[in-house]
Image (tube, rainbow, N blue to C red):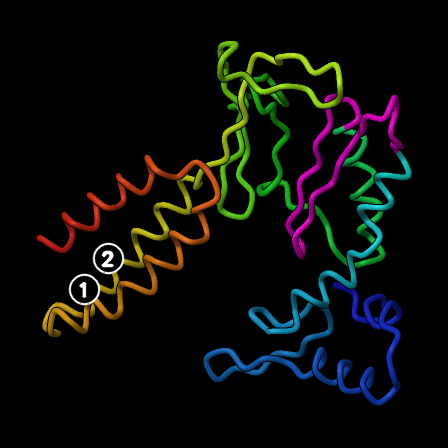
Amino acid sequence: MNHDYLLSKIHCPSSLKRDLKQWLKAGVLDNGVFEDTESGTPQGGVISPILANIALLGMVRFIETMYPKKANRAQATVIRYADDFVVISPSLEIIEQCKTAISVWLKPVGLEIKPENTRICHTFKPIEYDGKTEEPGFNFLGFNIRQYPAGKYKSGKTGGMASRLIGHKTHIKPSKKAVQAHTEVIKGVIKQHKTAPQSALINKLNPIIRGWSNYYSAVVSSETFVKLDHIVWQMLRA
């Protein structure tokens, strides 16, 4: 992230801006080796998500201006959380144009879209794109968003007065990567507490399990919770 660009978007007293500049350029100490920080924000720093929001402010509006609503329907919608974002559109052509436009918009910010973290896919069916098959659905913030075929009793509906069945249902679930990471955390805690009293292990595990479950409680998670419950029971039994 370009420090000068970021500081130019922050409107605050000069003394506070000076403190922010010193913080950004303070450098990092990694395994006893000092490195200058001429760009970027502190990894894991408490203020980094706020600075990312400031730097990327305007990107959503930029896409909405490029593709205004037609017949009261969005042509392209951007959902962003700090520096993670997805662009949704019924048109593949618009998605490709958005990818190019956002890449150009990000250059002055000092950022770029990472090809390895970027996918173009359909939410309902597999598609052939860029020489490979892209499976339906995508992951975002630990969730998997995908649509499934559904009969008339479970099908989703269009909005408005003249709503109609659309023949599919949108399901949001914990992503496989998030489940695996959560399992690894629990496994690590159990390993660290092999010789500890049972109560100490319970006190350590409960906040981790409760916090993860609360995060995913508002989506389609019952099947995942049952599976994880069995996995944790097996690990504890072992």
Mark on residue 7?
Answer: none
Relative to 205, 100 lies left or right: right
Asked whether, in this view, residue 106 is left or right of residue 236, the answer is right
Look at the picture and state if 76 lies above or below 186.
Answer: above
Quadrant including the N terminus: bottom right
- Picture layout, residue 61 above or below residue 125: below
User: What residue is shown with label 1?
Assistant: 191
Q: Are marks 1 and 2 in contact (CB under 8 Å)?
A: yes
Q: What's the magenta region?
A: 67-94
Near-viewer residue (148 or 194):
148
**Residue type pointed to by label 1:** Lys
Residue at image x 26%, y 69%?
204
Question: Gap between marks 1 and 2, in whole Å?
Answer: 6 Å
- Which mark is on residue 187? 2
Quadrant in the rendering for residue 226: top left
Give the residue type at disc 2. Answer: Lys
In percent of the image, x 64 and y 29: which residue is there?
120
Mark 2 is surrounded, within 10 Å at the Cα level, by few (under 14), some (14 to 19) or many (20 or more) other residues, namely: some
Q: Quadrant of residue 186?
A: bottom left
Q: Secondary structure at mark 1?
A: helix
Q: Which of the 4 image quarters holds residue 43?
A: bottom right
Q: Residue 69: x and y, percent?
A: 87, 29
Across and down, in percent, residue 213 comes to 38, 51
